[in-house]
Amino acid sequence: MKQRVLVLGAGFGGLELTTILSEEVGDRIDLTLIDKSDTFHFGFSKFDVMFGHKTADAVKLSYQRIVKPGVKFCQETITNIDPVVKRVTTNNATYDTDILVIALGADYDIQATPGLAEGGNEFYSFRGAERLRELLPTFSKGKVMVGVCGAPFKCPPAPSEAALLMHDYLVKKGTRNESEISIVMPFGLPIPPSPDSSKALLHAFEERNIKFIAKHLIKSIDPSRKVAVLDDGTEMPFDLFLGVPKHRVPDVVEESGMTVNGWIPVEKANLKTKYPGVYAIGDVNGVGTPKAGVFAEGAAKVAAETIIAELGKGEQPSPYQGNGICYVEFGDGRVGKVNVDFFSGPSPFGSYTEASVALAADKQYFGSSREARWFGK
Ligand SMILES: Cc1cc2nc3c(=O)[nH]c(=O)nc-3n(C[C@H](O)[C@H](O)[C@H](O)COP(=O)(O)OP(=O)(O)OC[C@H]3O[C@@H](n4cnc5c(N)ncnc54)[C@H](O)[C@@H]3O)c2cc1C
């Protein structure tokens, strides 16, 4: 009898786990991969869309391209998860499974920040990036604010990248000298575990006259006055607000009763939940790494190897290290590299490789190699 594996969510984590299981034990499993969307996109491609470098269609990868031994993709919306009996309901069917992997990512809670929907813009959802693509050409000059509305949030370098890319955008437009750019961030440094990359980013901000406001969050937006209110009550006027909305698990995950303090708790070593045969990988869990694709991918590898070992093929893997490489856009076609490790030492640490044009090619390869691996040529 083939083992049934159900993977919920075909994002970074779900795609990597599915690929490994298919390669290693595709002949021993019936794997169903479910996602409500018909396409995948890399998080960083939202910048390409927002700044008009690529069209929305150019960055979308169709799930129809997935042809892998033992794998069936279903485009369905998950409406109920019962982790005790490992039963999942969608808008189309009910699935019972032997192994359940939850990889449903993080959703955005726009309403948690009063005024954000009416008076600000967010660049974290695909729709938000598409809206900004239409809006940016109509913005000529003024005060631009990149504001984080809650923590944790995906890809901690992304607000810094947005500010640096906005700088380039306004330089090209010829209105940078008549504009101001500021970033409001909850951390003391742009990338706390990596002092060297934080130093490089702070230097880049200083060079470009970008104001970095540390250890604050955006509490609300007053759309009528075009003012952002910080968590200490400070009011900051803006002409263009680019927000990072508060994050939360998808509704269906919250309703499953699996969350504690907002996220699904897992064993750090192997991403197992307290429910036998149920794993949670990527942004949806509370393992303690940043919410980023590279960490979802690393978690997927360990969870996949654990499942393979339990299917009787292969050794138990080494415990999850919580490490990964993040590429950081510095603008002007240059990309820096941050290598962070959360679990192998006594505290998180990161090394930094200076931004260069050569690293922009590395980042491109990062995306194209995953596309080839997950979707085929
Ligand atoms: C602007 C920006 C830039 C970023 N840059 C980087 C970067 O450079 N490097 C990096 O590593 N990370 C980056 N990220 C973060 C990265 O995109 C995410 O952390 C990563 O995608 C998380 O992977 P995941 O598998 O946990 O979830 P996701 O990739 O979000 O996948 C979750 C999937 O679940 C599906 N889903 C959710 N609810 C349901 C439901 N009810 N029914 C069916 N399907 C459902 C969704 O459609 C989605 O496909 C960036 C993010 C943003 C916003």
Image: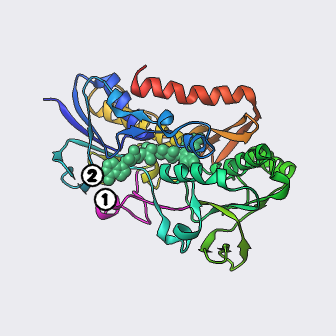
**Residue 89 locus on image (x, y percent):** 20, 52
User: Which residue appears farthest toward the bottom when viewing the image?
Assistant: 233
**Residue 325 locus on image (x, y percent):** 61, 36
Residue 315 is a magenta residue? no
Q: Is mark 1 within 8 Å of ligand 1?
A: yes
Q: Is residue 264 left or right of residue 345?
A: left
The answer to whether 54 is drawn above or below residue 189 in the figure is above
**Residue 233 locus on image (x, y percent):** 68, 80
Which of the two discs, 1 and 2, labels the residue nearer the N terminus? 2
Asked if the residue under mark 2 is in contact with the one under mark 1, i.e. CB atoms within 8 Å, the reply is yes
Q: Is residue 34 left or right of residue 129?
A: left
Q: Which residues are magenta?
A: 244-266
Q: Is residue 10 left or right of residue 88?
A: right
| Residue nearer the viewer, 202 or 257 | 202
Q: Which mark is residue 252?
A: 1
Q: Which residue is mark 2?
A: 78
Mark 1 → mark 2, Cα distance in angstroms: 7 Å
Determine which quarter of the picture holds residue 45. Answer: top right
Tag 2, which secondary structure? strand
User: Which residue appears farthest toward the left when viewing the image?
Assistant: 1
Number of numbered tags placed on the structure image: 2
Query: Residue at the spot x=76%, y=58% of the render?
Result: 141
Q: Amino acid at mark 2?
A: Ile
| Residue 289 visible in the displayed image | no
Dominant SS of magenta comes to loop
Query: Residue at the spot x=20%, y=41% of the render?
Result: 98
Query: Residue at the spot x=73%, y=72% of the render?
Result: 236
